[in-house]
Image (cartoon, rainbow, N blue to C red):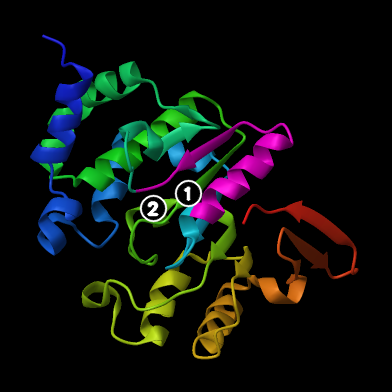
Amino acid sequence: MSLTFSQTLNFLWYTLPNFSTQGKVGMKYDLTNIQSFLSYLHNPHTSLKCIHVAGTNGKGSVTHLLAAYLGLHGFKVGIYSSPHVVEFGERIKIGREFIEEDFVVEFVEKHQDFMLTQKLSYFEAIFGMAMAYFKEKSVDYCVVEVGLGGLLDTTNIIVSTFNIITNISFDHQDVLGNTLQAIASQKAGIIKENAVVLIGEKQEEVVSVYQEVCQKQHAELNFSEDLVRYEYIEKESMYLYDTLNQDIKISKEV
């Protein structure tokens, strides 16, 4: 008998190990499980053009803003983000459209034995589903938000040529470390060889971390404040200035 969509979500949320409900015991902070799962799925991620977004503050907003920008330029964009606020489909989207419920049900029914045998976590199962979905739908790009950290996060199985790291602060110290440098090292783990890298603010405590990783990976390091600066001119508006000092007025509700 086929599962309903509700039953499928219950299986994923309550049967599989889950960091959101169990904490550290509900996660496996390495890539072995997702490597096995994606190999079993015939490695859908290897055919996808991915942009990877990490950080502590603002990574979800950056993920969706970048996806919207690409969509406005005519690209079909897959979005993987977490957690969801209201509906499961917020995690896996193409543009504004949530993943189809039928796809979720069929995917879980087909692969639940592997999920249980391999002891996949909720996050690992969902990420594998996203990669399979984006490949089936032939997206032009997928923008992937890191779940936790970067280096050993499930999403770090992707090969990305553009890596973004937003501002960092102290988060998940029990997993990522007790200093900003240690946390930055984990976030910088998403930086791939020969990638273009964009960092948020120049946080003096961690600049050297990014420089060292980018040098090792032969990656191009950029800091956003060197490319774009902004200034509040009046209460109702914000002006952005690019490096050529050409201003773009953006309406801002106060």
* Observer-nearest of 55 and 139: 55
Q: Is residue 222 above or below residue 235?
A: below
Quadrant where the image shows the N terminus: top left
Q: Is residue 148 visible?
A: yes
Most extreme residue toward the top is: 1
Marks 2,1: beta carbons within 8 A: yes
In this view, the residue in front, 169 or 149, is 169
Q: Residue at x 35, y 78 (%)?
A: 170
Magenta highlight range: 61-82
Residue 117 x %, y %: 10, 39
Judge whether residue 43 can be spotted in this image. no
**Looking at the image, which is closer to me, 205 or 29?**
205
Q: Residue at x 60, y 48 (%)?
A: 65
Mark 2 or mark 1, earlier in chain: 1
Q: Secondary structure at mark 1?
A: strand
Q: Secondary structure at mark 2?
A: helix
Residue 131 lies, with reference to residue 109, above or below; the image says below
Res 144 label: 1
Q: Which residue is mark 2?
A: 155
Which residue is at a point 39% across and 37% down the rendered structure image? 90
Question: The residue under label 1 is which amino acid type?
Answer: Val
